[in-house]
Image (spheres, rainbow, N blue to C red):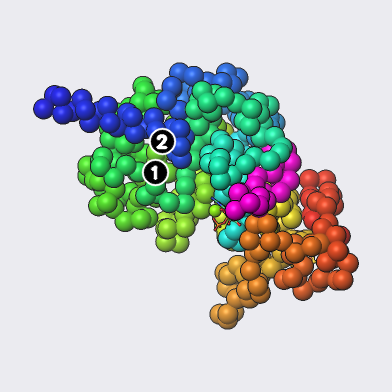
Amino acid sequence: MATGRRNENEELTRWNAGQAGSQSGFSANPQFHPFPTLGAHSEKLECPIAHDLDILTARRKMTLLEIKNLKIDFQSGHSQLRAVDGVSLTVGAGETVCLVGESGCGKSVTAHSIARLVPTPPARYAGGEILLHGRDVLKMDREELREIRGGVVGYVFQEPGAALNPVFRIGRQIREMLKLHRPEKATMDEVVRLLKLVGIPAPEARTASYPFEMSGGMQQRVMIAMALASEPELLVADEPTTALDVTIQAQILGLLQGLKQRLGMAILLITHNLGIVGDIADRVVVMYAGQIVEMASAREILRRPLHPYTRALMDSVPRLGGVAERLPTIPGNVPRAGHFAPGCRFAPRCPFARPACRETNPELLEAAPGRWVRCPVV
Ligand SMILES: Nc1ncnc2c1ncn2[C@@H]1O[C@H](COP(=O)(O)OP(=O)(O)OP(=O)(O)O)[C@@H](O)[C@H]1O
Ligand code: SF4
Ligand SMILES: [Mg+2]
């Protein structure tokens, strides 16, 4: 019996370590903190309010993540197809940035590259820098990468099934994450608290469930709880609410917002849906065909989207109190990586396209302070 339990423990530890090296990316060493100025979040929670506010203010001034001119290719036969083409963006400490765009625009590849999770091959990091607190992730060795995954950057993926181990109860899986990252909180009470935070009914009973006993939506919430267990400085959430109904979606977004406010955690939220950004985002980055086409504060984007693609995305968002009629869709499809039309990549679908648009791909230019647009016509 004792041997059986030890084997199970060893297997679970191995599995978590494997995840740390692959998708979920949780650090195997909870003591390691490559950026000591930011320390462990749990310390902040014990600070007096004034001190807390000082820390939060200081953090918001710091750039946590800076991606510079990132280029990522995929090998296809003998050709290299560029999926991410010169993406530059920043996420400040404590800031929430939404990365939006239709399917295939390069949102996930960009976001997964932050902890170098895009597998090479088939991918190739073809250029640029990914600076986390000024240190280039693309130059980190295996050990450094293992430490930033989960410790500094936590991920919530689109597919919860890929991150949950099917043969262990979910309470145990969350507790293992706590052991790795916040050992002093590795209790079933904390597991239950996290499950409650992500809106799982009867959390005490649910700790004994296996993933296959839960719906896709419930599994997704467990995955969010697991990511939150390490209280990362940057939470990258790739369509985290896709599998959830509207009410739970709002709860999860509220939860992320609350955590951001309490912990100063930055969030990079990837979504198809511009409709949710007003509730959570400080800034919005709109991607199309592997490039950024517009970048601005959430307020500005929602008030007056400039790029025709952003406008089209906004038009397809249902409005509260709007007339019940079919919402406009954007005609055509996002081109596949490497199959971009010459000139502006949005031209084949753009109602404002001019002949000149089909000749040169416009640059991303700063139209006003902090407001970037890739379209000379607007
Ligand atoms: N493993 C891969 N091999 C080849 N091409 C890939 C691979 N992964 C992604 N791509 C290509 O890279 C481009 C960007 O894909 P990505 O997954 O980042 O899109 P996305 O914006 O996240 O879309 P979605 O909203 O559907 O998740 C697409 O053209 C896709 O086909
Ligand atoms: S450059 Fe031309 S085609 Fe491209 S978005 Fe602007 S108006 Fe449309
Ligand atoms: Mg994606």
Residue segment shown in magenta: 67-88
Q: Residues within 10 Å of mark 2 (few under 14, many from 20)?
A: many
The picture quadrant for ligand 2 comes to bottom right
SS at mark 1?
Answer: helix
Q: Residue at x 56, y 40 (%)?
A: 120
Q: Which residue type carries mark 1?
A: Ala
* Closer-to-camera residue (208/279): 208
Residue 72 in the image: above or below residue 333: above
Q: Position of residue 32 (x, y in %)?
A: 49, 19
Based on the picture, tell me whether residue 162 belongs to the magenta stretch: no
Picture coordinates of residue 66, whole percent (x, y): 69, 35
- Numbered tag placed on residue 343 in the rendering: none
Residue to which mark 1 is pinned? 163
CB of mark 1 within 8 Å of CB of mark 2?
yes
Which comes sooner in the sequence, label 1 or label 2? 2
Tell me if I can see residue 164 in this picture. Answer: yes
User: Image height check: is 65 above or below 220?
Assistant: above
Which residue lies under the disc numbered 2?
19
**Label 2: element kind:** helix
Q: Residue at x 25, y 52 (%)?
A: 213
Amino acid beneath label 2 = Gln
Horizontal arrangement in the rendering, residue 309 relative to residue 34 (left or right): right
Q: Name the residue furthest bottom.
A: 325
| Relative to 102, residue 218 above or below | above
Whether residue 263 is visible here, answered yes or no, is no
Image position, residue 35 (x, y; %):
59, 21
- Residue 141: image quadrant is top right
Outermost residue toward the right in this view: 356
Instruction: Examine the structure image and report whether residue 74 is included in the region drawn in magenta.
Output: yes
Residue 212 on image: x %, y %: 27, 51
